[in-house]
Amino acid sequence: MPDLVPTDSAVADIDALQARIGHRFERCELLDLALSHRSWCAEHEGRPSNERLEFLGDAVLGLIVTEEIFGRYPDRAEGELAKIRASVVSEPALATLAETLELGAHLRLGRGEAASGGRHKDSILADATEALIGAMWLDGGNEAVSRLVLEGLGPGIDKAALDPGDTDHKTRLQEHAARLSLESPRYVLRSSGPDHDKQFEAEVWIGTRLMGRGSGGSKKSASQQAARAAEHTLAGDTPTERAPDQLNPTHPNQDLGTDSVAAPERASEDTHA
C-alpha cells in the first residue's frame, strides 16, 4: 500500500477498521474526516482536518472515563480520581489504543508527514483516536463510544489506580512544589516548524529558577517532559538556572526568539499528558 494518501486505494480497508472499532458508520463522511490529518489538508486546499472532531472527542473521552472511575472507586478522593483519569487518557495510552486498532494505516497524511513516520507518532495517533471518538459520538452516540473506550482503555484504569499520578509529572511537580512551600510551576512554550508538523519546547519555572526543559510533538508532551526534568531538579539531581535579568518567566506572552510562545501555563491545565 503506497504511503501517499489521498486516494481510496491508498487508505487501508475501512471495513476492517469499522469491524475493529465495533461500529459501522451511517455518516461515512465523519469517519473520513476523523482520518484526515492537517498535513494532508494542507496539500488539499479546502479539505477540513480532524482537529474539531479531536476537540469533541477529548471531551467525550474525559466524560466516559470520569464516569467509569467515579463509579469504580467510590472511596477515592477527587485528587486521586483526577490522577487516574490523566493516566488513562494520556497520549501514550491513546497511541497504544490506536496501534491496537491499526488506526495509523488508515490516516490521510501529507507526503512529508507520511515519509517521516507520522503513522507511528504518538502525538498523531493520540489525536486521531480522539477524533475517531468524536466522530463515533456524533454518528452512534454514547453506547458505541463507551464500548470502544472501556474495552480499549478499561484495563489501564485498574493499573493506573495502583499508582495514581505515576505518569502525570505536571501534577506531581505541582504537589511537590506545594509541599516545599514554593511558588506554583509556570510553563513557557515555544513552537517551531510548519503548521502541519509543529514541534514544541517547554520550560518550567518556579519563581525565577528554570527547573526543567522538555520537547515533543504536542504542547502536552513537551510540558510533561519539562515537568519530569523539574522533578529531578527538585530532588537535587540536576542544577537549576536563574532567569537572566532581561527575562521574567512569570510575564505572559514573552517572545523568546521562536515562532510562537504561549502564556505561562499552570501545571494543572492539560487534560491528557
Image (cartoon, grey):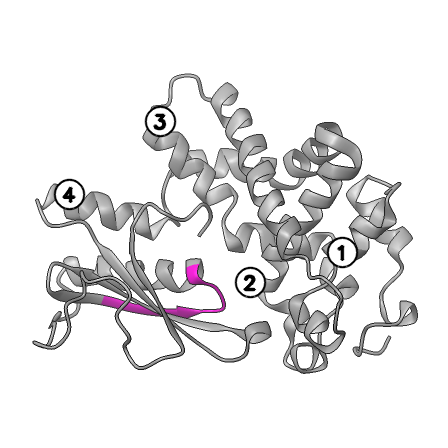
Q: Residues within 10 Å of mark 2 (few under 14, many from 20)?
A: many
Q: Residues under labels 3 and 4: Cα distance? A: 17 Å
The residue sitting at 16% across, 48% down in the picture is: 177
Farthest front residue? 46
Disc marking residue 123: 2
- For the residues labelled 2 and 4, the Cα–Cα distance comes to 30 Å
**Is residue 212 left or right of 36 when viewed as pictured?**
left
Predominant SS of the magenta segment: strand
C-alpha gap between disc 4 and disc 1: 43 Å
Three-letter amino acid code at the position of disc 2: Ser
Looking at the image, residue 128 sits to the left or right of residue 160; the answer is right
Q: Which residue is mark 3?
A: 78
Q: Residues within 10 Å of mark 3 (few under 14, many from 20)?
A: few
Q: What amino acid is at disc 1?
A: Leu
Helix, strand or loop status at disc 1: helix
Q: Kindly identify the residue that appears in the image at 52 percent across and 44 percent down.
A: 89
Q: Quadrant of residue 42?
A: bottom right
Q: Secondary structure at mark 4?
A: helix
Q: CA distance from mark 1 to mark 2?
A: 18 Å
User: Do the numbered discs 3 and 4 sit on residues whose CB atoms are within 8 Å?
Assistant: no
Give percent across and percent down for residue 261. 34, 69
Q: CA distance from mark 3 to mark 1?
A: 35 Å
> What residue do we see at 62% from left, 49% from top?
130
Viewer-nearest of labels 1 and 2?
1
Residue on which the image places disc 4: 178
Residue 190 colored in magenta in the image:
no
Residue 166 seen: yes
Whether tag 2 and tag 4 are in contact, CB under 8 A, the answer is no
For label 1, the residue is 33
What residue is rendered at 50% in x and 80% in y? 193
Circle 3: residue type = Glu
Question: Magenta part of the protein: which range?
Answer: 212-219
